[in-house]
Structure formats: structure tokens, C-alpha cells
Amino acid sequence: MSGLSIKEILKNSEHVNQEVIIKGWVRSKRDSKAGFSFLAVYDGSCFDPIQVVTPNELQNYDDILKLTTGCAVEIKGKLITSPAKGQEYEVQANEVSIVGWVENPESYPLAKTRQSIEFLREVAHLRPRSNLIGAVARVRNCISQSIHQFFNQEGFLWVASPLITSSDAEGAGEMFKVSTLDFQNIPKTADNKVDYDKDFFGQESYLTVSGQLNAEAYACALSKVYTFGPTFRAENSNTSRHLAEFWMVEPEMAFADLSDVTLLAEKMLKHVFQNVLNECKDDMLFFEKRVNNEVIQRLEKFLKSEFITVDYTDAIEILENANKTFEFPVSWGIDLSSEHERYLAEEHFDSPVVVVNYPKDIKAFYMRLNDDGKTVAAMDVLAPGIGEIMGGAQREERLELLDKRMESVGIEKEHMDWYRDLRKYGTVPHAGWGLGLERLVSYVTGVSNIRDVIPFPRAPRSAKF
Amino acid sequence: MSGLSIKEILKNSEHVNQEVIIKGWVRSKRDSKAGFSFLAVYDGSCFDPIQVVTPNELQNYDDILKLTTGCAVEIKGKLITSPAKGQEYEVQANEVSIVGWVENPESYPLAKTRQSIEFLREVAHLRPRSNLIGAVARVRNCISQSIHQFFNQEGFLWVASPLITSSDAEGAGEMFKVSTLDFQNIPKTADNKVDYDKDFFGQESYLTVSGQLNAEAYACALSKVYTFGPTFRAENSNTSRHLAEFWMVEPEMAFADLSDVTLLAEKMLKHVFQNVLNECKDDMLFFEKRVNNEVIQRLEKFLKSEFITVDYTDAIEILENANKTFEFPVSWGIDLSSEHERYLAEEHFDSPVVVVNYPKDIKAFYMRLNDDGKTVAAMDVLAPGIGEIMGGAQREERLELLDKRMESVGIEKEHMDWYRDLRKYGTVPHAGWGLGLERLVSYVTGVSNIRDVIPFPRAPRSAKF
């Protein structure tokens, strides 16, 4: 008799008629006139609470009657097959220890079982106690574990790309500065510029927007690597799709072209989705019931479908010929917006779609120029129900072309010397993509605001907890 | 015949006498007068390169003769049992495609096989191509994968703790500020203070020093969680043991005390070490031969030993009675320094040691006060050969005592309201620890400078790449 989790207890029947110990929190309580109380006890290990029957003979039955939602309890009792509907097992308690009370139950923010998702966001430290955010946490964990498992099996090495960086090479502009300077008295040089020499790193430093360039250095040595870590955007966007801090997965493969990493993307997504359906069934049923009734079905459909690859130029033609008015007009050269992406994946192809070979002018400097001289070997994976879920590219491995491209977008060579070295010494075709973990969790769970799928979201004017 | 990694090809004999494709980089080349060249080709999948025999009948043999260390090649050929000593298999090449030359081979920083570790640090973008840093990358990956596997098996959920935070609650002081303010023109309020209201988050914001407090919020809802992510210290220490950015693993368990998390630490370390010995044998043999001849032996010994738990007060007595002069004098109340820790683990106990119940005055405010009123339920795990490898504690779950402690160290209640809520609503005993990933990689590999076990180290005046 040891402290098994509720998941372990409910998983198989070997514990029936055995003594068990349950440690968790009261989800709800119902007192029967027949001299019993029923406690639903939850420990976070799985979606369902376990029902505990507490007879009034228990020595501290008066205290048990005072239990409210959120109280912490430790229960000893016997697991039996439940005579009641809606559950397979229940526990007949011999002993109920009250570990932690909820003082002033009426002030407990999670006292009500159903709170609005907006309210829960205000109490991010307590919201994992809710059904919704608890389920998100389990699915997010399952997705993350599956990603590591997948890459490990496929022979990729996890590489820690640096978070603090002195290179703003992508020219994103929207970067956070990292500093130990005294803001009250910023040190200045003789010509009244900020004296970064006095800062911790001796130069202007930022939080990274991507680990890709660093991952390239490792792929060009060890062949298959991936990053899985936080990245940052100081974008002043208060939308349901943007976070200032989010987690990215960025595989990078040497001796690989665009089609190799497209295959990799398909294989990984299917591995992840299959795992979620297998391991988080109860959580997914909850999302289906309460959040979006398509979440299970669309994953099952995704698993059966094969990715359709379409050239950007052809995609534009499809959109131009669509019997539909788009908010943003379509013509060759535009970046696809969400409505275009969803039209392609949902209405036109009804399948995951990979759009490849985008115009070079709308893509980053490091993408490989195609032979047509006007497109680059870039790809976006579009999924029905969400639109873009990954973006990637084959990288420009030819030094002269890379230099030309950097020049034309105004990136100074000397800033990128180390990146250019990768092309000077044993250069190889290589490619990779980036996946925003939160977008993926949002897609899988149907929880549409990205702030609800990361424990403590960071956004403009919001860095609490 | 597809692109298998060298690891897959060498792993078992099923590929012998089959056609294989090898994609990788030339480690070294030797030309035989008998009309052959021998290429050692490496792809990062395992420590060993594979020997490729290229006969002079090959159409581009003149080019092959020009190959130098670092050139990228793709080879088609037959895998055969090697007649030569020192290797089991070799490839008889039918075709050698040269994918990427090394231009000006004499300028290639990695041309020589053995470079000093200090020199390699200067070329962090190329150093994964060296034997040493390649081996570190594989072992680091194995350790990280093993940590995720372990916690997943044990029912812990991986939780992303936020990196950007507005709470400097640990009072560490040594934090990086995160900002989008214009340093050239810092906005000021009417009374000439920095106007943080104009900053991205509307308040002073930092990079986190620990995910623990956030992990506690999740443990107090979902029972067993862990973080695995970067943390930061703006400490101006240029030592071999400090980094400004490093990765931490922080499990947190509800309904757990100090001994529960000590057991967890022992179990996890043994799981990780066993995996490394099983999966990275060649890399470990290399470290044993070139870096530290004890690395394998000490892991094997660790696996056989049981953790010895010793009270801080007893540890002090042991040190006071030691027949040894310490640089830092010993008396009750001091924090143990490295020489003390190593004396305990290496000389006195000759075993991993867990020191518990430290004086409260040298420990953080959130640690649980023991009944003696002067010590707290803190623990440090000390390993022979390195000293402290983990630090942890049972957390103060009693609100009155937490408040008292915060008051005495000058932390304002209102700043910690959310943390206090965890004690107001269904509080439970809980505990956890923190493990610095880089310290662990350093211990396992014997690579003593922590800057060599993270791909792109960040330290004072150093944020390159």
C-alpha cells in the first residue's frame, strides 16, 4: 500500500479490493442523508477524479462535512468496483486526513467548477487546478515528450541554442534588450552614445528570436540536430496568436533538401498526434465536449492524410481562381495571410498542405535561391483548422550567393563571419524548419487563445507571476 | 540502399556486403602508394569515423587526392569486414562525390586534429566538428533525453516556467533586465525616475534565476511536475563553474518531504548515468583516455553506491574533527564550501552524500522551518569528484511561518500574494530540487570548464555567435 497516483489506480484492475492511499484535492463533495459523504478527489495525474465514500463512522466526520473544493486530503481506504454510474471504481475510506484547508471558501477563486477562461488567465497560479488548464498541461506535456522521443529515435541530437545573443541578424528589429546597465544613469561615451562597453556582455545584447543559425553550426558538424527552447518577440501585438515568450522546436539536417525536411515534418506531426490520441484520451474527450467538437476527428483525419505539396506560384493561381472574395487581395509576390492558408488547406485541398518555393523578397536572407532566380526553397506547412503550423527552408549553402543576398538586404558580412565560415569549410546542403510549440498545443486541444496553452503567458504589459 | 548514419551502419552486421551511402566530412586522409586513398569519414552520429577505401580507378581520383580535413563528401560503396586493425568494417567506394571543399585548407581552424580546448572555445561555431566537442554534444543529448524519459516514466509533467519575470523575489540581485526602452533616451517620470510604465511589460522585468516558484504553483495543482529550461545569473564571475545562461532541471512534488525528493534525486542520477554508460560507450572511452581517466569508473561506482544522508550539524562536527586544514574555517552556521563538500564526499564517506537541515540564516526564505526553530529542511547532494550537484528543500507550506520568514528577510507580502495563495487554498507539504545541467554534463564527461559543455557559452563580455 503506497502512494499511487489516481491514474495508476484507475489504469488497471489489479488494485481492486486492495487498500490504497489517495493524495489529492477535493474537486467536489456531496453529502448523502444516508450518513455518507462522497468526495471527488483529484491529483492531476489524469483527467478524472476518483470517488471516495466516507461513512459517518469516521472519527473526524464533522471535519469531513466541512470540506470544500480545493481542500487537500490524504485518504486510506479500499478500492472497490463502483456500484454507481459513470465510474468504474471508487474508494471506501477508512481514514480521511485533512492536509490543507481552504480558508474562507467563498473567497477561493477556483471554488466554482466552471470559470471563464478570461478569469482563469487572471489567476494563472491557480488555474492548473481547473479541468481545462489541467488537461492542457497534460496534453502539452505529452506533445513535448513525444517531440523529444521522436527526434531521439530519428538520431537527432538536442542542442541548446543560446537565448542571449549579440546578433540581431534576422533584422527582426522586434527584440528585447538584455542588460545590467543602470537605467537611471545610463553610461555614455564621449560622443554621448550608450556605452555598451560597460554592459555585462560588453556589447548590445538581445533575447534570441530563433535558434536556427546556431543549430546550423551544429548540423554542419553532427548532421542531425534540433533545438527545443524558448524564443522571444518584442512585438506589441495583443492577439490570441502572439506571445512575447514562446517555445520553438527547430530541427536542422545536413545533406538534406526541402523535401527531406517536409517528410520529417509529416512524420513528426503524425507521431505526436498518435501519441496524444493514445495517451491523453480523457483529456481529448473533454476538449471535444467543451472546447471544440472537431479536435479528435481532425487529428484522426490528419493521421490518415498525406501531405500535398504545392508550389507557391500554383497556390497563387488557385487563390486567384477561387470563387471567393478575400480580405487581402491575391497576386504573385504577396505573403499568404491566414485566410489564404486556410482556404488552401480547408476548402481547396481539404488536407495538410505544404506550400513551397516562395518569392525571395518576402523571405529571409538565408534561404536557398532556386534556379529561377526569383524564388527560394522555403516551405510552410498549413493544417486544416489552423493554417500555418511550421515554416522552414533549405539554407543557402553557396557562399557567393549568400554574400550577394546579405548585401542586397543590408546585412554586413563581418557580423556574419561565423555563419559564413560554415559555407567556407565543407559546406553541405542543409535544411530545417521551426514549429511554435504553443500553436501546436492550441491546434491539438482546440484552445484558441495561445495564452491559455502556456503556463504563465508573457505579452505586452503582462509579466506577472 | 539509403542514407543510413555511420552509427546505424556500424551498429550491426546486417549491412555487411551491402551497398551503402555515407554522407559526412573527411576527418583525415592517407594516400597509399599502392593506388588507394583511405578516408576517415565522420557524420557526428557516433564517435568513430568509418574508413573508406577509394581506389585510383575512380573517375575523379585526382580530386580525391586533393581532399583535406573538413571536406564534405558523399560516398557510395560496399560495406565489408575490414582486413585492417582497429576497426571492424570499412567501405569500398564506387563513387565519391565531393559536396563541399575546404578552401584554403591551411586557414581552416579545425585542420589539425588536436587543438587546445581554449582555442576551440574561440571557434564555438566550428568546435562541434572536433572529437571532444562532438562527444560532449552526444553525451549532453543522452543526459537530457534520459532526464525527460525518467520524469515522464515517473509521472511528472514537464512545465514551462517563464523566463521573463517581474518578480525578483529571491532577492538574488544578480539579474539581467529585459527591456524595450530606448537606452539612448530613457523615459523618465515627473520625479525623474525611470518610467517603466513605458516599457514593454509596463514594469521592471528580468530574466529568471529559477523556475521553482512557478513550478510550485503547478505541483500544488497537478502533484508532480518538473521544469527543464534556461535560467540566468548576471554574476560577474569569470570562473570555470559559472555561466550567465545555463539549463536547470527543477522537479517539484506535492505531498512530499525532503526524503522523498532525495530518493528521487538518487533514482534520477542513476537512471541517467546508466543510460550514458549504455548508449555513449565510445564517447565515454574517449573522455577516459583523453580527459579524465576516472570518468567511467566513478559513474560505475556511483551506480553501486547508496546515498548517505548526514545532518548539517553532524557534517560540521566531522569537518571540525577532520585531520585537515581547510582554507575556509569550519563552524556551525557557515555555508559549506567546495573543499568541505569534497572532503565529505571523497575522503570521509567516499560516497554520494546528502547534507540536510542547514541553518535557516544561510538558506532561502521559502524553505521549511524545522522544529528546532533554527534549521530548515534543505538538502544538497554532494558527489565525489565534483562536490555539490543538486540543491533542494521542502518548502514552507504553513502560511504564518512563511509570512514571518518573508518579513524577517524583507520581502513584501503583496509582491508574493500569488505565492501565498498556494498556502491559503489547500496547502500541502511539497519539496523539490534544482540541478544544473551543465554541472552534470561536466561531471559525467570530466570536461572541467563549464563553458565547454554548452554549445555557445554566455559569460561576462562574451555573447558571440
Image (spheres, coloured by chain):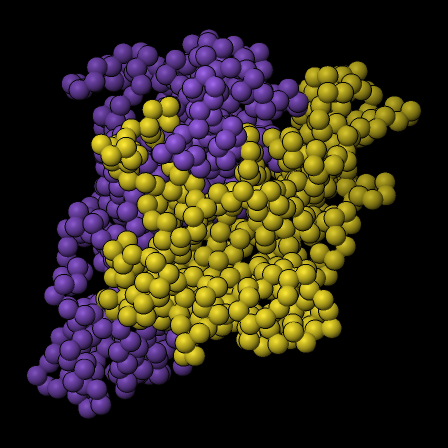
Chain colours: A purple, B yellow
Q: Residue at x 70, y 41 (%)?
A: B132
A215 shown above or below B372: above
Q: x, y (%) of residue B26?
A: 72, 29
Question: Quick one: quadrant of the N terminus of chain A?
Answer: bottom left
Is residue B248 left or right of A128 when viewed as pictured?
Answer: right
Foreground residue, B268 or B58? Answer: B268
Foreground residue, A49 or A248? Answer: A248
Q: Residue at x 36, y 53 (%)?
A: B169
B43 shown above or below B32: below
Q: x, y (%) of residue B351?
A: 66, 70
Is residue B129 left or right of A338 when viewed as pictured?
Answer: right
Q: Residue at x 29, y 43 (%)?
A: A463
Foreground residue, A91 or B305? Answer: B305
Q: Residue at x 55, y 37 (%)?
A: B460
* Residue that protrudes farthest toward the left in the picture: A33
Q: Is residue A309 shown to the viewer in this render?
A: no
Which image quadrant is residue A347 in?
A: top left
Which image quadrant is residue A255 in?
A: top right
B433 shown above or below B454: below
Foreground residue, A265 or B369? Answer: B369
Which image quadrant is residue B373 in?
A: bottom left
Q: x, y (%) of residue B297?
A: 73, 61
